[in-house]
Image: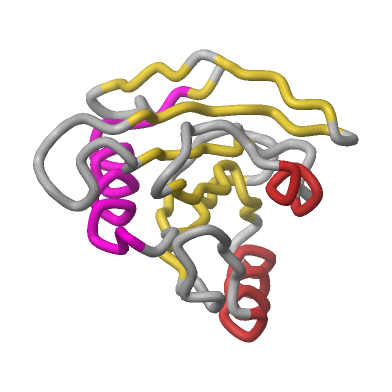
Amino acid sequence: MLRIDRATYDAIVAHAKRDHPDEACGIVAGPEGSDRPERLVEMVNAAGSPTFYEFDSTELLALYKSMWANDEEPVVVYHSHTATEAYPSVTDIGLASEPGAHYVLVSTREHGNNEGPVEFRSYKIVDGEVTEEEVTVVPDLPEI
């Protein structure tokens, strides 16, 4: 199950809507081993595409260096689908390289960047196996 605070959830949805009709992408980092999504990092879709996303390699390397320096890991890897449901494509499954991460997909196909609900779904993707998981949005994540 993915537990995510309301502010982070809203920020991911806003990013997906803002970048529509292109796919948006980003990572939410958290303390290593905590499964706590705490620090949202919106990334640039280097592909600039409505059907594909690609992290900019320089930006991604800088993010990983920052995470390593802060004892963080990617807790959520997210991107949007602009014309299809919020389910991982074959390409998405092939790109999933963080077995501990939650892979969040946001579909903006119904309302684009206008007001209206989106599909927000989360998956575990390990060795090509996709398992949907429950998403619980909480007011804020309590301190441990």
50 lies above or below 59: above
Spot occupied by residue 121 in the image (x, y as percentages of width and height): 47, 27
Number of numbered tags placed on the structure image? 0
* Left or right: residue 64 compared with residue 27: right
Q: Residue at x 39, y 30 (%)?
A: 120
Q: Residue at x 14, y 34 (%)?
A: 116
**Magenta-drawn stretch, dominant element (helix, strand or loop):** helix
In the image, 24 versus 98, the foreground residue is 24
Q: Residue placed farthest to the left in the image?
A: 115
In the image, 53 versus 38, the foreground residue is 53
Q: Residue placed farthest to the bottom in the image?
A: 58
For the rendered model, the colour scheme is: secondary structure
Extent of the magenta region: 3-21
86 lies above or below 139: below
Quadrant (top left/top right/bottom left/bottom right) for the N terminus: top right
Spot occupied by residue 62 in the image (x, y as percentages of width and height): 60, 80
Asked if residue 9 lies in the magenta stretch, the reply is yes
Spot occupied by residue 36 in the image (x, y as percentages of width and height): 51, 35
In the image, 124 versus 75, the foreground residue is 124
Q: Residue placed farthest to the right in the image?
A: 127
* Left or right: residue 67 compared with residue 18: right
Spot occupied by residue 11 in the image (x, y as percentages of width and height): 27, 48
* Left or right: residue 40 compared with residue 61: left
* Left or right: residue 110 compared with residue 59: left
Q: Residue at x 47, y 75 (%)?
A: 48
Q: Residue at x 67, y 39 (%)?
A: 101
